[in-house]
Amino acid sequence: MKMNKPFPKKADYVIIGGGISGVSIAWNLAKKGAKNIVVIEQKFLSWGATGRCGAGIRQQWSSEANCILAKKSIEFFEKAQELLEYDGNVEFKQEGYLIVGSNEAEDKQFEDNVKLQNSLGIPSKKLTPQEAKEIVPHLNIEDVYSATFCPTDGHLNPFTTTDAYYKAALREGVDFFTYTKVTDILTKNNEITGVVTDKGTIETNHVINAAGGFAKEIGEMVGVDIPVYSQNREILVTEPIEKIQGPMVISFSKNIYCQQTPHGAFLMGRGDERPPGYSMESTHTFLDEMAKTVTSLLPPIGDLRVIRQWGGLYNMSPDHQPIISDSTLVKGFYMACGFSGHGFMLAPMTGLLLSEMILNEPPSLPVENLKLTRFDGKDIKEYEKSVV
């Protein structure tokens, strides 16, 4: 980090949040010629959701917007090593997602999903239980009704991928300041004028809220009510073994995702219904439930030793789709939040679309359905059902 540099008194753009969304936005802005860009992170880069996520990348959605965002993001990730001129390895393991269903309702949803995905150029296909087992031989198909598979889905290393963006942004002149906490945002006549931190105040007319689990609080600093909340989701990782599984295996009804990383360890997580908050603790309940589920669905994995487990914050939006938006209330305030657990996989397009929005360029994709204004006048409760 350029921590030997004096803390800036002025900046053209201040990005709050040093996760993958923040560094992607910074790099995209800089590549387009923007100058004097500062990224502020309260801890270290990837400290929040990015460094705690499962880092899976899938295009298999029931939402057209998410399908397109994910497809375009994967197209970037396939070339990220070269595009970001990275001297490390982003470890893009592109061996697919196998999504298994356990009932007729999921089977019908799979049919609809694959039809949509194929219409958008996503090479997913619907499988019988036997075909699914051919892809993952240790899959227990006793309770599998059908499945879908997309071979171009995959998994990345969240730390090295963020590092690749960070180093690329540094080369473009972006300044990063870690262990720096934003305490207030200044406005005058409903326009951004500055950012107050515990290291000093930065005069600026543009603030980008990429604060992940803390995005709502950043919005409150300028009087913008962002309808998001944060919720802890847990993950565990096992000891490494020889490779036995290529794809990420997901079951929505069984509440599990499970991926073998390039290093041989199995990484797995699940959702829960705990109340909103900022706890990132790990629990025995998670470990017990995960052990039962993975042993049933993927029996050999039940024999592995758990190395560690942790929690991280999902920043949930009402419709479980991202908010990539400017503000109609405060000029110069922008948001990239509400990713509902999928911010890592959408980061390339988040950075591109928001940089276009900030610089008043034509958007590469339609953005109206991603803007905060989509919730205007709506009953937020109507969005309570999950979008998968």
Image (tube, helix red, strand yellow):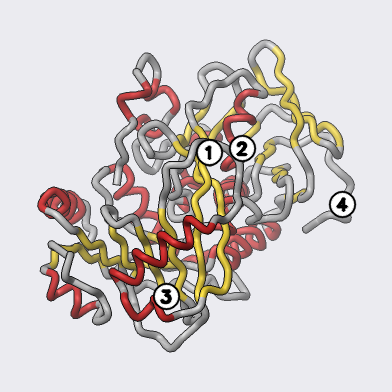
Tag 1 or tag 3, which sits nearer the N-term?
1
Amino acid found under the numbered disc labelled 4: Lys
Tag 1 or tag 4, which sits nearer the N-term?
4
Look at discs 1 and 2 and give the one toward the viewer.
1
| CA–CA distance in space, label 2 to label 4 | 27 Å
Return the residue found at the far top. Answer: 189
Does residue 351 show up? yes
Amino acid found under the numbered disc labelled 3: Gln
**Residue occupied by mark 2:** 214
Q: Nearer the viewer, residue 302 or 237?
A: 302
| CA–CA distance in space, label 1 to label 2 | 8 Å
Quarter of the image that includes the N terminus: bottom right
Report the residue at 73% width, 45% height from top.
Answer: 42
| CA–CA distance in space, label 3 to label 4 | 41 Å
**Residue occupied by mark 3:** 260
Left or right of 273 on screen, residue 329: right
Report the residue at 37% width, 14% height from top.
Answer: 377
Query: Judging from the image, what secondary structure is the residue with disc 1 in?
Result: strand
**Residue 118's x, y, as percent?**
17, 56
Tag 3 or tag 2, which sits nearer the N-term?
2
Report the residue at 57% width, 74% height from top.
Answer: 307
Query: Judging from the image, what secondary structure is the residue with disc 3 in?
Result: strand
Tag 4 or tag 2, which sits nearer the N-term?
4
Q: Nearer the viewer, residue 336 or 43?
A: 43
**Residue 89's x, y, as percent?**
56, 75
**Residue occupied by mark 4:** 5
Residue 250 occupies which quadrant of the picture?
bottom left
**Residue occupied by mark 1:** 230
**Residue 127's x, y, as percent?**
13, 67
